Amino acid sequence: MARAKIALIGAGMIGGTLAHVAAREALGDVILFDIAEGTPQGKALDIAEATAVFGSDVALKGANDYADIAGADVCIVTAGVPRKPGMSRDDLIGINLKVMKAVGEGIKAHAPNAFVICITNPLDAMVWALQKFSGLPKEKVVGMAGVLDSARFAYFLAEKTGVSVQDIHAWTLGGHGDDMVPMVRHSTVGGLPLPDAVAAGLLSQADLDAIVDRTRKGGGEIVALLKTGSAFYAPAESAIAMAKSYLLDQKRVLPCAVWLSGEYGLSDLYVGVPALIGANGVEKVIEFTTNDEEKAMFEKSVASVQGLLQACKDIDSSLA
Ligand code: A3D
């Protein structure tokens, strides 16, 4: 059987890391696409040479022409610009919306059957625009943010409680902004929902409050440390988990930005919710029960996403 073809649109920090992880895991042949000449070719050659060390038979190729992504099974989009210190994700909207238009048209022309994972920020608006520009089925276009935000939440909980990350299940829902919603009642440490974990003395309420706050600001913490860009290792691993669930029909339930049509009382927008990803793309949206406090936080986060969609429509009238 032919190997899967994975097209990485954007060969920057996340794109290069995606190529490395995809090759190491032998997920499929990799095309690294970028407008910068030489960068995708150089990274592809470097990783191709590494395959002789880690022993993977996948092929890697750098490209500046969309024709090279033809027939891709998965496209992961990181094209655009990342944040620098002092910038919010929303500051990127003008530049990255134009990039989504070019990328969407390229995917539509050359890889219309692909499962598309968008990572470019501001995430919930860019994945929405990418679906519109590409015209691909809504269940085949998703945004990566929740897996990363939830991984940060889980890591901070593991660090504080001393429990293995493998035995922590953490969930964040809503938009990928500082008003994202870490779901305290639905997240567990060793099977205990977090309020019960506090009652059992695994961490204090003050610790939990600080972790929730740090999770919301987790992207900014890395930007402030790196100074020249944003996180890339954990974002790449997160998108690979989503790609694997699709390619291997794993049917994992992962928090992703997905198109909603009535779920959570919302329609016509992308926002982060738990979604079952299998061979057909987004196969099901899982609806968590929410109490009044969680509902209010979710609605606030959704309002931020709706503001970003309006900004996109104001910039590009074809989206209105
Ligand atoms: P970076 O290393 O700058 O890579 C972006 C690449 O996109 C560069 O190589 C550019 O040359 C390329 N590019 C620019 N315009 C185009 C175009 N029109 N077509 C093809 N390629 C183009 O950034 P990065 O890899 O660190 O981050 C990529 C994006 O991911 C940024 O928008 C970040 O804000 C975003 N990001 C999102 C998350 C989420 O959790 C959603 C996390 C971290 C970063």
Image: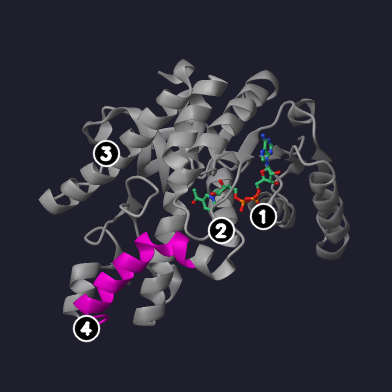
Q: Check disc 3 and report the residue beneath it.
A: 303
Element assignment for label 3:
helix
Element assignment for label 1:
helix
- Sequence-first tag of 4 and 2: 4
Q: Which label sits on residue 201?
A: 4
Q: Position of residue 228 (x, y in %)?
A: 62, 61
Q: Check disc 1 and report the residue beneath it.
A: 13
Instruction: Write the residue at 58% across / 44% down.
Output: 243
- Sequence-first tag of 3 and 1: 1
Q: Nearer the viewer, mark 3 or mark 4?
A: 3
Q: Which span is picked out in magenta?
A: 202-221
Q: Quadrant of residue 286?
A: top left
Q: Position of residue 157 (x, y in %)?
A: 36, 73
Do the numbered discs 2 and 1 sit on residues whose CB atoms are within 8 Å? yes
Which three-letter amino acid code belongs to the residue tagged 4?
Gly
Residue 278 seen anywhere in this rendered image of the structure? no
Do the numbered discs 4 and 2 sit on residues whose CB atoms are within 8 Å? no
